[in-house]
Structures are given as C-alpha cells and as structure tokens.
Image (cartoon, rainbow, N blue to C red):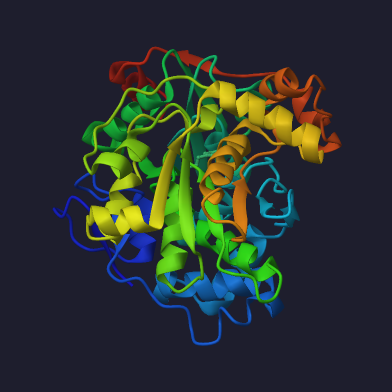
C-alpha cells in the first residue's frame, strides 16, 4: 500500500515513511492509494473474532510489507488490550464506550498503535526522535502515555492554557520522563498552526527528527477503524446496519469510520456531531466549506475551527457533495443542549454522559426521530471524569474519580508557558537540542 499527499507535490510513501514523517514534505496529509475491501466472510464472522484479530485483518493491508506479520500482530494486540463495550442506554440507542484505556479516552487506541509502530520503525535510529503534537485536551495525554519511557523518543506537547480540564492537564504535565508540556497562551488552532509551521522549518527539522502524533498521522488515524467493527460485532444477531454518531472535532475518528464503511462494514448512516464549531455541518448543508476560528465550548476536545481530516473525507468521496450528504448528516449542538442532554439522560436512564458523548447523543436522537426502529450507536469518546465541571453542573452530582487516577492527580505539574507565536516555539525547539 502506498500513500499519496493530498497536496500532490510529494512522492508517494509506504506506511513506514508516512508514519515516521507524519505529514508529507509538501505539507499535505497522506491518503491511501486504494481502500482495501474486507476479506470475504470477515464481516459475518466479526462476533467470533478477537479484538486483536479484527485489528490485524483491518490494518494489515494498510501496513503492507513494512512490518513482519508477527510484529504487527503484537502491536495490534497491545493497542486494543482493554474492553470496548457496547452499552444499551435506551431501547434504540447504545453507547460504544471507548474510554477504558489508560487515559480514559478513545485516543488511546490510535496513540498506542502509533507509538509502537514508531518504536519499531526507529529501532535502529541513533538520532533522538521528537514527537511534536498539538492537543485540545485528550490527544496529548494519550500520546504521552503511549510514548512514556520509550528510549530515544522525546514527546513535546502544545496545549492551550486554561482550556483543558484538570485531569487532562495532569495527564499532559505530570508524567515527567521524556514528556514535555508547552502551555500555549492561545487556543487549539494556535497550537496546531505552530506545530504545522515547525514541520516546514528546515532549521528545526535538520536538528531534530520531527514526527507528528496528531490524528493526521496515518498510524494514529487508521487504527481508529477497528472499534467501528467492534460495535457491529456486539450488535444483536440480525440487527439492521446501525446509525453511528461520532462526536467530532478534527474529524480523524469519523473519517476512520468512513474508511471501515468503504471497506464493507455495514453502517446505515453516519452523524457528524459537532459543538458550536460547525464548519463541517455547514459544508454538509451548503456544499461549500469555509474554515472558522475555533470557539470555546463545554466539549473542548472538539473546539476545532478548521478540521484537518476534512480534506480526507472529501478525498474519500471524490469531493462529491451529494454522495457525502447521503451518507453523513451534520449537527451543531449548543452547550445548553449538551448540558440538558447530560442531565436528562442521567435522570431518565442512569447513564452518565461526558459532554462529547452528549453532543453525539443529542444529534443521534434527533436523527433517529425520522428513523424509528433503526438501531443507533454513539461513540462515547471519554470518561465523564475528564470533564467534571460540565457533568457536575448538569447532574448536580460529583463524578467519582476512578482509583486508577489517584496517583497521577497527586503529582506535581510541570509546564513551560509559551506565547502563541512561531518564534517562541522555534526558539524552544532550537535551544533545547
Ligand atoms: C479528540 C476528541 C474528540 C474529537 O475527535 P476527532 O477525531 O478530532 O474528531 C471527541 N471527543 C473526545 C473526548 C476527544 O478527546
């Protein structure tokens, strides 16, 4: 399998090259030259396959010859070694819980897969590798946890000051070892812009081997397909193809689901559930896209004004707006509706949503009003404890902290404050090698 750059100025690359570089030299996102079909009988046998086997079968065509079978099998098994339960919330709606990994968010899957791939690919490397990543909250923690203590790898995380939750901030700033947190006085789009600029700066890239850990990296993006398969695997036998609602910010997660669908996974419809940052829902409505400036919301991991992976969605469907519109509905959900949904679902069902899951729940419920009887699944992308203020405000109850977090929360925070200018990031990157 080869990957081409969506900017079309760079040579095609194999999985190894694309994963190590993160982004193509021309600044474009890598995209697979063809989308493989699942092998015959795979979808029918999902319920009897292990999560690791499903991951291997899904990902092998994308990884191709760059890794021996045994290595890829081991990486797949390690990346998905926690549960992905499909939990009924109402008769029609179930939650696919993606928060049972080490940092309590779905990004653990991609981050664990990617960190192990990069570890394997750089096993003979003598220069230190710098994983440079912008986070709106959850990416950084998942990436940091995935790479913690990996020899020869330094992780530099940029996060928007004051815009991540206390648990998230601890997960970014308190791990120590090879993980460095840059606290940017700006928003997520600032962080993302600074990271993109560093990759284009030869003075920086000649000194550090930079690699990206954002959802643009194919090694993070592609493994997110597997839990869509786990959702279908756990549906009751004979169920109709589900409507799947995905709380979306940078759109890596949703775009991975669309890949699995293109490979043959039975999904009836997708719902792109956004907060006030509605660039993609606006595109779905009008057929024209304009980037926005991110605004802050309760579901802060989705505060993205100009989602990177949107260009991959366009590519997947050859930019055909009617085709995309047929498969994908967009919703923009207000903070007021998010809070009301957390409260109402908790009161009526006892299920505790986090704000991101609540955005998806609200959108899914609305979509299903026109589709009685069709099963709906929303991705619950984070544990509610990561967003305690929003959840407590909605339900009036404090969220019990899982014991697994006690030790992390008691540690000292270490971050370096950074102005939201490229000069500031550049100075840091050049002066600390
Ligand atoms: C990152 C994140 C999202 C958005 O995922 P994208 O792939 O960027 O669309 C949604 N929910 C949570 C909890 C997240 O951390």
Q: Is residue 68 above or below residue 111?
A: below
Q: Is residue 222 above or below residue 197?
A: below
Corner quadrant of residue 285? top left
Tell me: 155 left or right of 281: right
Corner quadrant of residue 234? bottom right
Location of the N terminus by quadrant is bottom left
**Residue that lies at the very extreme toward the bottom in this rendered image:** 40
Q: Is residue 43 above or below residue 7?
A: below
Location of the C terminus by quadrant is top left
Which residue is at 40% across, 68% downward?
262
Which residue is at 73% across, 57% downward?
85
Q: Is residue 174 among the parts visible in the rendering?
A: no
Q: Position of residue 391 (x, y in %)?
A: 71, 25
- Number of disc labels: 0
Q: Position of residue 37 (x, y in %)?
A: 41, 78
Q: Position of residue 293 (x, y in %)?
A: 33, 22
Q: Nearer the viewer, residue 72 or 185?
A: 185
Which residue is at 39% across, 45% downward?
211
Q: Nearer the viewer, residue 162 or 355?
A: 355
């Amino acid at each position: 399998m080869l990957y081409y750059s969506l900017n079309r100025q760079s040579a095609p690359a194999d999985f190894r090259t694309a994963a190590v570089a993160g982004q193509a030299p021309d600044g474009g996102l890598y995209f697979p030259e063809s989308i493989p079909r699942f092998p015959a009988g795979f979808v029918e046998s999902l319920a009897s396959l292990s999560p690791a086997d499903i991951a291997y079968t899904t990902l092998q065509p994308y990884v191709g010859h760059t890794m021996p079978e045994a290595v890829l099998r081991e990486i797949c098994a390690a990346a998905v070694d926690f549960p992905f339960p499909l939990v009924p919330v109402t008769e029609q709606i179930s939650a696919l819980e993606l928060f049972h990994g080490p940092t309590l968010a779905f990004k653990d899957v991609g981050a664990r897969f990617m960190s192990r791939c990069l570890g394997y690919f750089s096993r003979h490397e003598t220069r230190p590798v710098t994983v440079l990543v912008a986070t709106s909250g959850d990416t950084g923690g998942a990436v940091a946890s995935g790479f913690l203590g990996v020899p020869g790898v330094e992780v530099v995380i940029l996060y928007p000051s004051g815009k991540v939750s206390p648990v998230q901030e601890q997960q970014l700033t308190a791990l120590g070892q090879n993980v460095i947190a840059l606290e940017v006085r700006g928003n997520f789009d600032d962080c993302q812009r600074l990271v993109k600029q560093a990759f284009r700066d030869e003075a920086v890239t000649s000194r550090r081997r930079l690699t990206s850990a954002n959802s643009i990296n194919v090694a993070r993006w592609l493994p997110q397909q597997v839990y869509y398969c786990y959702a279908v695997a756990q549906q009751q036998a004979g169920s109709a193809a589900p409507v799947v609602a995905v709380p979306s910010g940078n759109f890596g997660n949703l775009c991975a689901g669309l890949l699995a669908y293109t490979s043959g996974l039975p999904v009836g419809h997708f719902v792109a559930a956004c907060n006030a940052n509605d660039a993609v829902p606006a595109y779905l409505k009008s057929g024209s896209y304009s980037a926005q400036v991110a605004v802050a919301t309760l579901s802060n991991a989705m505060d993205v004004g100009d989602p990177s992976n949107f260009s991959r969605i366009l590519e997947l469907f050859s930019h055909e707006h009617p085709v995309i519109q047929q498969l994908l509905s967009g919703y923009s959900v207000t903070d007021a509706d998010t809070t009301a949904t957390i409260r109402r679902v908790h009161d009526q069902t006892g299920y505790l949503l986090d704000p991101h899951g609540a955005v998806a729940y609200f959108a899914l419920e609305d979509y299903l009003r026109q589709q009685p009887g069709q099963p709906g699944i929303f991705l619950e992308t984070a544990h509610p404890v990561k967003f305690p203020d929003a959840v407590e405000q909605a339900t009036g109850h404090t969220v019990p902290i899982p014991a697994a977090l006690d030790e992390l929360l008691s540690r000292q925070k270490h971050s370096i404050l950074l102005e939201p200018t490229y000069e500031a990031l550049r100075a840091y990157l050049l002066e600390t090698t």
